[in-house]
Image: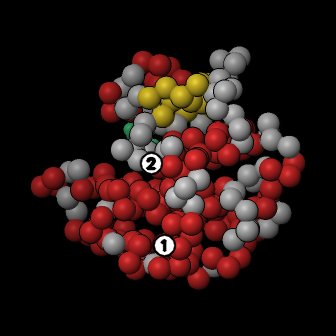
Amino acid sequence: MKLIYSTASPYARAARMAIRELGLTKTVDEVEHHPFDNPRELIDANPLCKVPCLIDDEGMSIFDSQVICEYLDQFADDSSRLFKDIDNSWQLKTLYSLTRGLLDTAVALQQDKMRGEGQSEFWQERFNKALDRGLAYLQTHLASYPKRFEILAINTVALVNYMEFRHPEYRVLEKFTKLQLLYEEQQNRSSVAQTVPK
Ligand SMILES: N[C@@H](CCC(=O)N[C@@H](CS)C(=O)NCC(=O)O)C(=O)O
C-alpha cells in the first residue's frame, strides 16, 4: 500500500502515527507530495487533491484521514485496535469528532493567514474563539480519555503540535497545561517523534 502525505499536514500525521502504532511501516510506503503542487498521482487518487490519501494493493483510493485510519485499524488484532475505545463510547467518539473539528479550524486559520492582505479579522476571531472553547472542552474531558495511546490521543497530539507549529503566537501549551502534560508524555514515542511537522 502507499500513503501520499505532506510533512506539515496534521491529518496526514495522524495517518502516519496510526501506521506506526499498528506496526504497518513495512506494509505501507509513504510518498511525500505537497498538495499545492497538484501532483498527478494525488489528483488521480483523490479528486479533492488533499492529503493524506491511501492507495491499497488493488489500487483502491481511500481518504480522508479518518477513513484511512479506520481502514488500517482492521489489520490490527482486536486488543490493539486504535478505534476500539471510541467505537464503544459515544462520549469518546464525540471527543474524537471535536479533535477533527479543531484540526479543521486550525488549518482554516492557517489558510486565512496565508491570504496576506486579504486576511479576515472576522474569520480569524471566530476561529480563535472556537479553538479556545474546543481546546478547553478537550482539557476538561481529559480524564475520560482511554489510558492507552489510541486514535483520540493521536489526534490530540497532532492538533496540539500543529497549533505550536503554525500558530506559535496562540501559546497552546501555556494556555492548556493539562493538554501540555498529555502532549509531553508522548514526545518520546516513536510514532510521535518520527512524524513531527516540518
Ligand atoms: N478531512 C480531510 C482534510 C485533509 C486536508 O484538508 N488536507 C490538507 C492539508 S492539511 C490539504 O491537502 N489541503 C490541500 C487543499 O486544500 O487543496 C482529512 O481528514 O484527511
In the drawing, does residue 62 fall left or right of residue 22? left
Quarter of the displayed picture in which ligand 1 can be seen: top left
Q: Residue furthest left?
A: 117
Q: Is residue 134 visible?
A: no
Gap in angstroms between the C-alphas marked 2 and 1: 16 Å
Q: Residue at x 43, y 45 (%)?
A: 9
- Please state, as top left, top right, bottom left or bottom right, where the N terminus lies in the image: top right
* Residue 73 screen position, x and y as percent: 75, 43
Asked if labels 1 and 2 touch by Cβ distance under 8 angstroms, the answer is no
* Residue 10 screen position, x and y as percent: 47, 49
> Label 1: which residue?
180
> Label 2: which residue?
196
Q: Residue furthest right?
A: 78
Amino acid at the residue labelled 2: Val
Q: Residue furthest front?
A: 188
* Residue 106 screen position, x and y as percent: 40, 60
Q: Nearer the viewer, residue 46 or 14?
A: 14
Q: Residue at x 80, y 41 (%)?
A: 76
In the drawing, does residue 61 fall left or right of residue 146? left
Q: Residue at x 48, y 72 (%)?
A: 180
Badge 1 local density, few (<14 within 10 Å), some, or many (20+)? some
